[in-house]
Image: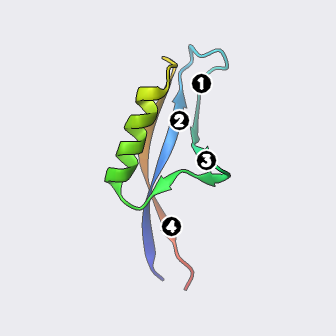
Amino acid sequence: MANTTRYVIWAHREAESLFGPATNPVIRNGALLSFPDKIRARCECDRLNARSGNPHVRYSVQHARDRAPA
């Protein structure tokens, strides 16, 4: 079996937020927001953080390994 490395964007909401603390992967157009390389993921994460406008929400990149079917 081949392994594929992906980098997933996660949203982190602080406890001071109106809705309380939470950490979730970002879903865009019904799919997990992920990238095949860390540089592209980091660029998107930086763009999201710069445009957030919410001091209680931040974005990060986390490594994920998917198992491809044999």
For discs 2 and 4, the disc positioned in front in the rendered view: 2
Residue density around tag 1, few if under 14, some if 14–19, many if 20 or more, within 10 Å:
few
Mark 2 vs mark 3: in front: 3
Q: Which secondary structure, mark 3?
A: strand
Give the residue type that dot 4 points to. Asp
What residue is shown with label 3? 28
Q: Earlier in the sequence, mark 1 or mark 4?
A: 1
Label 1 sits on a secondary structure element that is: loop
In whole angstroms, how far apart are the C-alphas of marks 2 and 1?
Answer: 11 Å
Q: Residue furthest bottom?
A: 70
Q: What secondary structure is found at the residue carrying circle 2? A: strand
Which residue occupies 48% across, 17% down? Answer: 55
In the rendered view, does 24 fall on the left or right side of 65?
Answer: right
Quadrant where the C terminus sits is bottom right
Which element type, helix, strand or loop, lies under badge 4?
Answer: strand
Q: Residue at 44% x, 60% y: name it.
A: 6
Task: State the residue position of label 4.
Answer: 66
Image height of 28 relative to 20, above or below: below
Q: Assess disc 3: are there few (<14), some (14-19) or many (≥20) residues with their C-alpha within 10 Å of its C-alpha.
A: few
Q: Residue at x 41, y 36 (%)?
A: 47
Residue 68 lies, with reference to residue 58, above or below; the image says: below
Kindly report the distance in space between the C-alpha atoms of the residues bearing marks 2 and 4.
20 Å
Residue where numbered disc 2 is placed: 11
